[in-house]
Image (spheres, grey):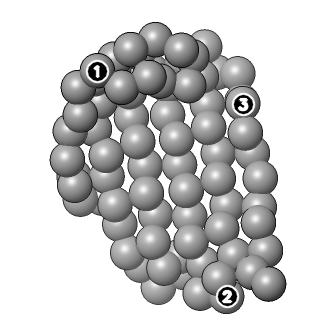
Amino acid sequence: MNAIGSFKGLQAPCGRIVDGERYEDHDDEVVITQETLYTCGCQSIQHEYHDGSVSRKIVRHDGHVLVDELLSAE
């Protein structure tokens, strides 16, 4: 996974204002994977697939899953 940048002072999924880093990767199975890691421990992961569908998962720092969805291409 390649780091694409860091950020400061953004709102994490838990509501805290924290710093963090964004990562992006490209591979054969998933066209693009984007991951955002917050210093509080929250994370956001998004996969974009060849067929245009997108899966998204947002997890709070305590492990509670806030979003876990698959959006199919139309």
Instruction: Name the residue beneath numbered marker 3.
Output: 66
Residue at (75, 81) in percent of width and height: 73
Q: What residue type is labelled 3?
A: Leu
Q: How many marks?
A: 3
Q: What element carries label 3?
A: strand
Residue at (23, 26) in percent of width and height: 8
Crowding near the residue tagged with mark 2, few <14, some 14–19, many ≥20 C-alpha atoms within 10 Å: few
Q: What element carries label 2?
A: loop
In terms of image quadrants, where is residue 37?
top left
| Foreground disc of the pair 1, 2 | 1
Instruction: Name the residue beneath numbered marker 2.
Output: 51
Q: Which of pointers 3 and 1 lies earlier in the amino acid sequence?
A: 1
Q: What's the distance in space between the residues labelled 1 and 2, CA to CA?
A: 35 Å
On screen, 51 above or below 27? Answer: below
On screen, 55 above or below 5? Answer: below
Residue 33 coordinates in the image, percent (x, y): 46, 63
Crowding near the residue tagged with mark 3, few <14, some 14–19, many ≥20 C-alpha atoms within 10 Å: few
Q: Which amino acid does label 2 sit on?
A: Asp
Q: Residue 59 carries which label?
A: none
In front: 45, or 9? 9
In terms of image quadrants, where is residue 62?
top right
Residue at (38, 75) in percent of width and height: 26
Instruction: Name the residue beneath numbered marker 1.
Output: 9
In front: 9, or 2? 9
| Foreground disc of the pair 3, 1 | 1
Asked if residue 65 lies left or right of residue 14, the reply is right
Q: What element carries label 1?
A: strand
Asked if residue 12 lies left or right of residue 67, the reply is left
Residue 1 coordinates in the image, percent (x, y): 30, 58
Q: Which of pointers 3 and 2 lies earlier in the amino acid sequence?
A: 2
Q: What residue type is labelled 1?
A: Gly
